[in-house]
Image (cartoon, coloured by chain):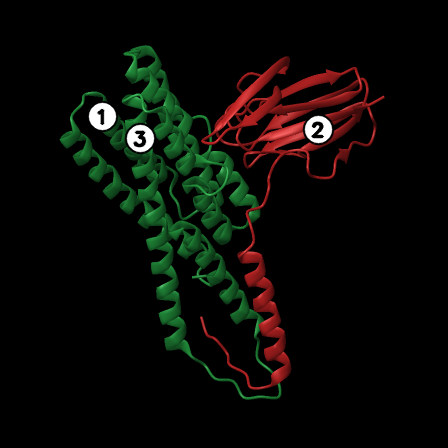
Chain colours: A red, B green
Amino acid sequence: MTINRQQSARPAIFCILFALFGLLISCGGSTEQAAGKATPSKEASGSRGAVTMKLIQFKPATLEVAAGAEVAWTQTDAGFHTVTSGTVEQGTGGVTPRPDGRFDSSRLATDQTFSFTFDEPGAYPYYCSIHPATMRGEVRVRG
Amino acid sequence: MANKNFARLLAMLLTLALFGAACGSSDEEPEEEVTEQTAASSATGAATLRAGLTELLQEHVYLAALATGAALRGDNAGFTAHAAALNGRANSNSSDLVDAVRSAYGDEVGTAFDGLWRSEGHIPAVVAYTQAVAKGDKTGADKAVADLLAYAETFGTTMNSVNENLPEAAVTDGVKMHITTLKDVIDAQKAGDPAKAASALREAAHHMGEFAATLAEATVKKFPAKF
């Protein structure tokens, strides 16, 4: 790799500003990855929704559907994931999953799918019981 | 503190790499090539990465051993403190490792690594093994080991999918060796044999140094311009 030096002031000022911006980013805190903070994804028809499990994440993390919609989860990662309704408590050295019994896919291998129909309006948090520390999602059902 | 500085140093190295790319040549001014300096910077970057990963992965086994030792002697406060230092949401060994991976591989892979590293099949399974060993529960201990070995397979496959220079089998075997060496530490702690526990811990730490070298080399190979 070759570094090219230059003498003019204008590019140098730009470079200094760019580096300072990068340093500000690098010195910042860690990025919060909790589920539910992304903008909800609204499916087109209202009768179906789709979530993909990829790179240890539910994509989209938050899905909005109409009451009566069926949501299908597709597992694309190596290993296993689950789709388990409930919440996750953060502790000092780890997490404690709190399933609520509403739905649970059990272990899904690569390319397996799981579906659930949401009849009642409300917010339905869920998580992967194998990766509860970070892999969480929410389905928001509108009336 | 040293690990947080390492994560920030990695991020700064990345920034400097981008800085070097952004400061492109000007049509108005003559350019000057500094290839020797660049080669030295690259060698320093790669060495810094390897040293940083070694420090973090060895810290991982030391904190794990401190946590399991505390658990086995019934020191709940000690276990809680070391578990937090090992795997807390922030200001922990796990969060520093995630930051280091994120600084090299980007946000999406960093998030995936965060989920993978904090999987129930990793540190919680080590805790489960320790708890099972403490009460003589062979079935529970065997299940925890099975969960850890399954985790090793998934870890190898996933890391290979984000970096083709990391052979799946090599990474899986590396994690399995980590599991085996740490298990030896826990078993020696349970047996009340401090000499054996110390010797096993040295072995576990040495292995992590080798594992860090494998990970660092593959990362440098994937992102030569960054390191």
Q: Which residue is mark 3?
A: B179
Pick whichever, B96 or A57, lies toward us. Answer: B96
Q: Name which residue type carries label 3.
A: Ile
Q: Which residue is mark 1?
A: B189
Dot 2 and dot 1 residues touching (CB under 8 Å): no
Give the image location of residue B43, x and y in percent: 35, 65
Q: Residue at x 57, y 19 (%)?
A: A98
Q: Give residue A50's mark.
A: 2
Q: Name which residue type carries label 2.
A: Ala
Question: How many other residues sit within 10 Å of disc 2, few (<14), some (14-19) or many (≥20)?
Answer: some
Q: Residue at x 14, y 32 (%)?
A: B195
Q: Residue at x 58, y 45 (%)?
A: A31
B105 sits to left or right of B206: right
The chain holding disc 2 is A
Give the image location of residue A59, x and y in percent: 65, 35
Pick whichever, B69 or B123, lies toward us. Answer: B69
Rendered-image quadrant of the C terminus of chain A: top right
B48 sits to left or right of B192: right
Disc 3 or 1, which lies upstream in sequence? Answer: 3
Determine the CA span between mark 3 and mark 1: 15 Å
Dots 2 and 1 on the same chain:
no
Rendered-image quadrant of the N terminus of chain A: bottom left
Dot 3 and dot 2 residues touching (CB under 8 Å): no
Query: Which of pointers 3 and 1 indicates the residue nearer the eye?
Result: 1
Q: Give residue A46's mark.
A: none
Q: Residue furthest right?
A: A143
Pick whichever, A135 or B152, lies toward us. Answer: A135
Query: Which of pointers 3 and 2 indicates the residue nearer the eye?
Result: 3
B47 sits to left or right of A94: left
B81 sits to left or right of A87: left
Determine the CA span between mark 3 and mark 2: 37 Å
